[in-house]
Amino acid sequence: QGTRDHPPAYTALRDRLLAAVVTCFKRHGAAAIDTPVLELRETLMGKYGEEAKLIYELQDQGGELLALRYDLTVPFARYLAMNKITNMKRYHIAKVYRRDNPATTRGRYREFYQCDFDIAGQFDPMIPDAECLKIVHEILSDLQLGDFLIKVNDRRILNGIFAVCGIPESKFVTACCTVDKLDKVPWEEVRGEMVGEKGLSPEAADHIGEYVQLHGGLELIERLLQDPKLSQNKLAKEGLGDMKLLFEYLTLFGITGKISFDLSLARGLDYYTGVIFEAVLLQQENEHVEEPVSVGSVAGGGRYDGLVGMFDPKGRKVPCVGVSIGIERIFSILEQRMKASGEKVRTTETQVLVATPHKHLLAARLKLISELWGAGIKAEMLYKKDPKLLKQLQYCEDTGIPLAAIVGEQELTDGVVKLRDVATRVEVRM
Amino acid sequence: QGTRDHPPAYTALRDRLLAAVVTCFKRHGAAAIDTPVLELRETLMGKYGEEAKLIYELQDQGGELLALRYDLTVPFARYLAMNKITNMKRYHIAKVYRRDNPATTRGRYREFYQCDFDIAGQFDPMIPDAECLKIVHEILSDLQLGDFLIKVNDRRILNGIFAVCGIPESKFVTACCTVDKLDKVPWEEVRGEMVGEKGLSPEAADHIGEYVQLHGGLELIERLLQDPKLSQNKLAKEGLGDMKLLFEYLTLFGITGKISFDLSLARGLDYYTGVIFEAVLLQQENEHVEEPVSVGSVAGGGRYDGLVGMFDPKGRKVPCVGVSIGIERIFSILEQRMKASGEKVRTTETQVLVATPHKHLLAARLKLISELWGAGIKAEMLYKKDPKLLKQLQYCEDTGIPLAAIVGEQELTDGVVKLRDVATRVEVRM
């Protein structure tokens, strides 16, 4: 349940999509690493907040207690700490596992690919963070998925807001989770949950509401930096200062047109400590709607400066920032688009079928195909002793093989091959 | 235990190796599929004989009872049966899981890659089987691993031998397992196990010994086809007839020089029904030994005509033959060779570092690198506001970046970039 086999057409399209992502990661100088699917259970515990219940555990068959990795970020942090690496730019593309309620039509599975790019190391503020956003911008532009928007916020700004609204620090995380729902439900509902379930005062909730419904760009950052309350809060001031720097760098990259400083963005995971971001696709223009509507998140990430330290015996911190590309969601979109267009993906790359026009020529086919393979040519033949020529040409048409190399008695005598263009039926002897 | 992180240098070398294998699989017209790491436990039960105890099981957290896949063959057979596919040539490269005693120095892990190529379908005898052997020959030749030998046998021939030696059919499988040890221990020891543990008569054991110590080529096949006892056994006769055909095809492929019909080859897994084979590397000539000694299996496979039927509600059979490339063993060899030669693998592909010779030029670097990325050039910069030029050039040398694009005040004024060849220190303004 919630997993699936990937047939050839799927795999071919997926490989094309992953290649585009890898090309971008390599363009930015990242190295690839790989970590086991299995992690010690204790490694995963206490890293995912309420989501921890979705971790797959292995049966205790003697030896270590194991679990399947939930994401690629925690294994990366463990990898850095275990190997005492303080400086690394890496990508990792692999499957992760979540015992979630699958929603397969929306591309949500229990086993799915993640494509992560992260920068670890102590650097000057916001330079690696800006590069992560640039990467999201490049990938979503390259894939031509339609219009998109990258929402940016900072955990320090959110915590600052909670503080100035009088929320006790112990409730920051839960308040964060509630705010995070603002992209799916209206403010009134979020406010209801805050006052009801979460037990915040109506005044505090209203006060939070004034902030978290704001979104904009550099001018909003400037305005909040002047905000009499927020500007008094150390965390918020730091966050806003860095956000201003980030926007400066993004301006130099020329991508602020698709970036929105959005105070409602909170993101669920425990481990974020600074900048957070999420990219959403906007409804296509040809769907004739007044305002562009989000059709779901396709990338997300943020800064997690404390995670590596959790795995280091001496608690030594390695600041990190990273991005995860939501390849499954993107794949669903490309797949639907392909179905709609009726385009067919070739699942093999075979260039030529070695064929014979009559019986008793298996030896000739085997010799010729062996020669072609030796020359690096992608070649197939039917696994029949005496296949009919029509069947062989039909196989070319079915599977998209463009050429047939035909050897009959005459060709053998003359020492030639008849090369046939399957589509045009033009034949040349060579 | 028995798993490992793959650091960048490993991953880069592995990706190169896998690319070579995929190139060969695609040259033979295979399509790629992917299946989940998780399988239903019942899918894996009864397919691996005594090895079943090595299967990793997941904890029962509600829902289906799951296990981690043990190989890629059983999932492939399940895939064919579930989707009612009767005809397919596919490859699959993915990790599999075995709770084995790890022997990591010999490349044996609990999580490791398998690279499988299989041909499913009802075809004329031995044509797909010959292609599998051709693929092993191509890959081992391409990778230049040194001299190798591909041993070939047939389960039907082995079973025929056991039958004519008076072994009851119920003991075929266990006799098979014992014979399989002949590549590691001398015949006397194998004989001892047969007569002792397995309870065969000394006469039967001696009789088996006469057969299973034979190896050769076409002339041996011909001799056994004339063998007064074997030629009376239906299974053995079928197997020997097909073996003869196989050698004819391999002769046309020009690869019999590295193929040995070896009656001691048995292979452990339950599901093989016909041809079986295994490739071993031979000790290098420069090690001055009289006779080439096997240093371990690097590929193996065979025919399994009954496995798909086990997953079909109506038991419909789909004959299959396939090969698995032992990529981990091959990797260990390449890695040792690389260490010995002192060759360093580059872990990134960065072409140019964007650098500045003095302070206050971060904006210039960000603008230039953005332009380079936009042009598809792999570029990096240091994440410092004001890095020293020496540090930047040192980074190029450490990571193998061949070029530095340097912008200073003068270059900005002139609208040029100074491009420096890191190795030669030659600079051009452009």
Image (tube, coloured by chain):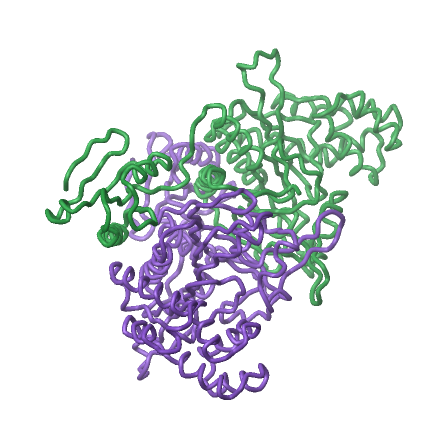
Chain colours: A purple, B green
Q: Position of residue B141 (x, y in %)?
A: 48, 28
Residue located farthest toward the left when viewing the structure as drawn: B414
Q: Position of residue A13 (x, y in %)?
A: 42, 57
Write down the quadrant of residue A320 in the picture. bottom left
- Quadrant where the N terminus of chain A sits is bottom right
Write down the quadrant of residue A42 in the picture. bottom right
Write down the quadrant of residue A324 in the picture. bottom left
Q: Residue at x 40, y 80 (%)?
A: A211
Q: Is residue A359 left or right of residue A237?
A: right
B29, B349: nearer the viewer = B349
Q: Is residue B182 above or below residue B67?
A: above
Q: Is residue B57 above or below residue B135?
A: below
Q: Is residue B51 left or right of residue A217?
A: right
Q: Is residue B285 above or below residue A255?
A: above
Residue located farthest toward the front when viewing the structure as drawn: A232
A275, A295: nearer the viewer = A275
* Residue B116 visible in the snapshot: no
